Amino acid sequence: MAEITVTEHLLLHQKQSPHATEQFTGLLYDLILSGKTIARRINKAGLLDLLGGTGEINVQGENVQKMDEIANRILTYRMERCGALCAMSSEENAELVRIKPEFPRGDYILIFDPLDGSSNIDVNINVGTLFSILHRPEGKRGEVSLEEVLQPGHNQAAAGYILYGPSTMFVFSTGQGVHGFTLDPGVGEFLLSHPNMRIPEQGKIYSVNEGYRKNWSAATCEAVDWFHNCETQDGTPYSSRYVGALVADFHRTLIYGGIFMYPADIKRPEGKLRLMCEAAPLAFLAEQAGGRASDGRGRIMERKPECLHSRTPLFIGSSNDVAAVEKIYAQHRHAQTDLIFTGAL
Ligand code: AHM
Ligand code: MG
């Protein structure tokens, strides 16, 4: 098979799509370079004393891992110099980062989670970088306002992730299908390994943290029980898998199908996952791959964020599996049996 590098793929795409400008291709190229740099640091983390926490708590109230901070610095440094951005928002920073006047500025806004699932790093389990790219609304000039950044997911120009696993993978979409590339460490290039990825209509795996069951609403319990009791197309029961790193759980769902769920619960009435840097980019990929992404009521892609760090419940994966959950939530809403959580139904 001819080996297509991600750079060749981007240049080809740039020729085919009138929306893909040189600025946009350059942005993706710098993201990929940042991903390769982060991958190198992760590979050596155990040798360089980069494991464990920094002792600090981030804006989300969570322990900051050393690698979280390193990944955030690598991305921030490179992306603020890339010339394609006017602003960035990182899961690790409370405020919007506007590109300083000393750097060239462009029309795009980058939202990212530098190292998702970083609590897994100490035990050598997959982690990932998630990104979402928005275009600044037409006609806007000067300093970017927060309102310009708070756009619903259907406005995304591109989205994707870098998965640091047994191999490093770059998976992305610009709205023309989902394509996956695997890093060949010998040549330092991402090569096209998974062209045009598609999520099966129905899967065989459900994925949820069942340890929280006592905090769930009746609707959520019923939705998860549905996967306990129903059968796959082969007549076998659904299997359960949960890595606890969203990128890894989503990547498996993208390839094998099934459903990943992070519902709201009594402790987290709006869910845990962030709409802008986690749910929206994965929803974009899921829909581009023929799947579905929902907050239990409707499309994640239609939700307009209230702030940079808005959270949402997430049900994502095979369209039939996500539709089954939406149906159960709708029945509970209709019967008014379960309205204790704002976001749960
Ligand atoms: P993080 O951004 O602080 O790493 O948290 C997000 C992670 C996701 O990767 C994962 O899906 C989820 O948290 C797991 O949460 P839990 O441990 O509550 O199941
Ligand atoms: Mg995260």
Image (cartoon, rainbow, N blue to C red):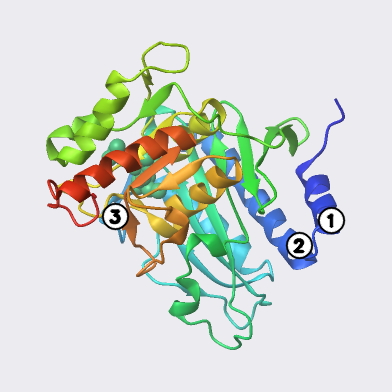
**Is residue 201 something one can see in this rendering?**
yes
Q: Are marks 2 and 1 in contact (CB under 8 Å)?
A: yes
Q: Is residue 232 left or right of residue 111?
A: left
- Residue tagged 2: 20
Location of residue 21 (image quadrant): bottom right
Q: Quadrant of the N terminus?
A: top right
Count residues near mark 2 (Cα–Cα under 10 Å), then give few for <14, some for 14-19, many for 20+. Answer: some
Q: Residue 72 at x, y = what percent? A: 49, 56
Q: Which residue is mark 1?
A: 16
Residue at the farthest bottom position: 142
- On the question of residue 216 being in view, the answer is no
In three-dimensional space, the C-alpha distance between marks 3 and 1, rounded to whole angstroms, equals 46 Å
Front-most of residues 13 and 319: 319
- Residue at 87% across / 30% down in the picture? 2
Q: Position of residue 154 (x, y in %)?
A: 53, 61
Side of 148 relative to 168 (left or right): left
Label 3, on which residue? 56
Q: Give the side of residue 338 with respect to residue 280, left or right.
A: left
Q: Closer to the camera, 59 or 277?
A: 277
Residue drawn at x 57%, y 61% is 156
Name the N-terminal-most of marks 3 and 1: 1
Tell me which residue sits at (27%, 46%) in the image.
330
| Secondary structure state at the residue bearing disc 3 | strand
- Establish whether ligand 2 lies closer than 8 Å to the Cβ of label 1: no
Spatial CA span between label 3 and label 2:
40 Å
Where disc 2 sits, the SS reads loop
Judged by depth in the image, the label closer to the viewer, 3 or 1, is: 1
Position of residue 338 measured from the top left corner of the image (x, y, whole percent): 14, 47
Task: Judge from the rendering whether residue 290 lies leftward or rightward of residue 150; answer left or right.
Answer: right
- Is 295 above or below relative to 138? above
User: What amino acid does circle 2 point to?
Assistant: Ala
